[in-house]
Image (spheres, helix red, strand yellow):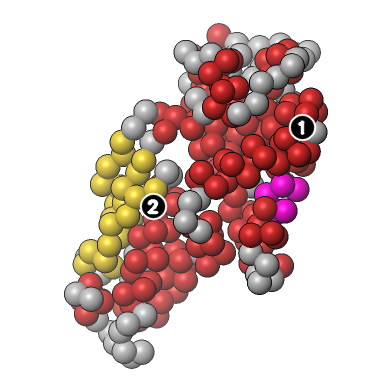
Amino acid sequence: MGSLKRLQQLLGYSFKDESLLLEALTHRSYTKSSNNERLEFLGDAVLDLLVGEYLFDRFPNYNEGKLSKMRSSLVNEKSFAIFARDYDIGSLLRLSSSEEQNQGRDKDSLLSNAFEAIIGAIYKEAGIDCARKIVYHILTKHYPNMQIQDLALDYKTTLQEITQERFGVLPIYNLLSQEGPDHKKRFTMQILIDNIEYGIASGTSKKLAEQACAKIAYEKLAKLPPKSNSAKQGAKL
């Protein structure tokens, strides 16, 4: 089990009213009153704004379409659940015994909702500037070295179109390993095209690792002659 103090240290923010944090961690199965649904509603709006603002400032040359695609890749249940696991929020959730037995502490939906609620609680108590500092830190930590830019390109979709056109097959992604504790896992994936390995890459989620693999394969295929019909040529590059 984690601790509220440890969570606040990781977030870089200490609540003056700790009951707000407890409310953000309280699932509706635990109590019908003072659960995290209202704070989740608030946090969802705050995150939508701050992630959009972060992308707007960081990528001044991107048009609305690219920015929207990037934001939708970040503002979703899967991404928020990954952030929640990084802070071990699951161990602090207040759940009913039945939800506990139903593996509620590791459900993406519950983790995502709690993460949104915590951001909502921070905004409620400390305002937008404090919430912005924390959200920006989380985004920078999870997407270092401009990796967030790859979200706008969606290499997986682009690569799929290329391999279907050139080789008549779809890329295959294999999970090679996953390491680390539940709240801080790292996944290593392999990409195959026509049974030929094109690359291996790692990420903090399977989705990011697959995107990294797709980028490697895409860059290899880009070096092939336009009308090449052999995947094996690209694998040797």
Q: Image height check: is 214 above or below 123?
A: below
Look at mark 1 in the image and give the residue it sits on: 123
- Total labels: the figure holds 2
* SS for dot 1: helix
Query: For this rendering, which residue is in front, 208 or 130?
Result: 130
Instruction: Name the residue rendered at 70%, 60% in the picture.
Output: 56
Residue 114: quarter of image: top right
Q: Would residue 75 be found to the left or right of residue 32 on screen? A: left
Instruction: Name the residue rendered at 31%, 89% in the picture.
Output: 225
What type is the residue that disc 2 sits on?
Answer: Ala
Q: Looking at the magenta stretch, what is its main secondary structure?
A: helix
Instruction: Name the residue rendered at 72%, 35% in the picture.
Output: 130
Circle 1: is it few (<14), some (14-19), or many (20+) Cα within 10 Å? some
State how far apart marks 2 and 1 are (Cα).
32 Å
Q: Would residue 174 be found to the left or right of residue 72 on screen? A: left
Instruction: Name the residue rendered at 39%, 55% in the picture.
Output: 210
Q: Image height check: is 79 above or below 32?
A: below
Q: Identify the image quadrant of the C terminus.
A: bottom left
Residue range highlighted in magenta: 49-53
Q: Position of residue 195 (x, y in %)?
A: 22, 65
Residue 112: quarter of image: top right
Residue 231: quarter of image: bottom left
* SS for dot 2: helix
